[in-house]
Structures are given as C-alpha cells and as structure tokens.
Amino acid sequence: MFDVTCELDDLARTVDFAMSLEGSKKALLKPDPTCVLAYQLTDEYYCIGWLLKNTLGKDTEGWTPLPFTYDPEIVARIVAQWIKSRMWPIPDDTDGSVELGARVQCLQCVRPRRDIETPWRCVVAVTGYNMTYEK
C-alpha cells in the first residue's frame, strides 16, 4: 500500500520510490525490456503504468506509450504540468497557506477505479492535491 502527498518539487523522488516498490522500475530499466512505460489520463488521475512491447500498435485499451525509457525526472515534469493545468479543490477551512502538490497512490489505494481502463496496467496514480499548512 502506498498513498502519500508531496510537494511538486519532490514528485520525481516520490514516483520513483513508488515504481520501485512494485518492481516495475526494475522491469522497465532492464536490458531489452519486454514492456514500455505508458500513461492514461482520467478526469482525476494521471496513471503511470506499462504496456507489453508486443501490444504496441494494437488496441492498448486507453494506455498510451511514452516515447522514452523510464526517467522519473521527465515523468515528474510531465505530471506536474498536467496537475498545474487543472483546478483542484482548495480547502476553505484552513487558516494558513495552501500549496499545490500531488497525491501519489498505488493502484490498490485508488478509489474509485471505474474510470481507469485495464487498471491492472497501472502502477502509480497521481492526482493534484492542495496541501495546507496551518498556523
């Protein structure tokens, strides 16, 4: 189980840690991997997962391959840009500052999953999260 929030500056390290927990990082980085990094967007989540190389060019059921090998810095920049382009609910009961961050979850923690096509391909789901710092 993995469900944490982080500042956008820490997103690369957080995603990298989450990918390594499940073993996908190792599979994506081995010589001549059988799978490639992929993503899927839903209304709420930027899902990071994988596709088998032999399925490329076929129906990938909502998943799009990324045109580079796994690099957490690149993935984090893409996801942060997606987060910044959307509106996320700001809590109205805070008396301190609010900073846009990310919530990073493994698939088992994502509820509901109904919008994720072929969810078993998903390793990490990221959503925007307004982090509050109380006085």
Image (cartoon, rainbow, N blue to C red):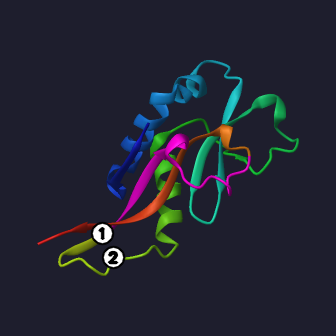
Determine which quarter of the picture holds residue 129. Answer: bottom left
Give the crowd class for mark 2: few <14, some 14-19, many >=20 residues within 10 Å: few
Q: Is residue 18 above or below residue 101?
A: above
Q: Is residue 109 left or right of residue 49?
A: left
Residue 94 in picture, x, y percent from top left: 23, 77
Q: Residue at x 59, y 55 (%)?
A: 112
Q: Is residue 107 above or below residue 9?
A: above
Q: Is residue 34 above or below residue 6?
A: above
Residue 4 in picture, x, y percent from top left: 36, 48
- Closer to the camera in the image, 31 or 21: 21
Q: Is residue 54 left or right of residue 76?
A: right
The boundaries of the magenta stretch are 100-117
Determine which quarter of the picture holds residue 32. Answer: top right
In the picture of the structure, the residue carrying the numbered disc 2 is: 91
Closer mark to the observer between disc 1 and disc 2 = 2
Residue 57 in picture, x, y percent from top left: 86, 41
The kind of secondary structure element at disc 1 is strand
CA–CA distance between discs 1 and 2? 11 Å
Q: Please state the total of marks drawn on the protein image.
A: 2
The kind of secondary structure element at disc 2 is loop
Identify the amino acid type marked 1.
Glu
In the picture of the structure, the residue carrying the numbered disc 1 is: 99
Identify the amino acid type marked 2.
Pro
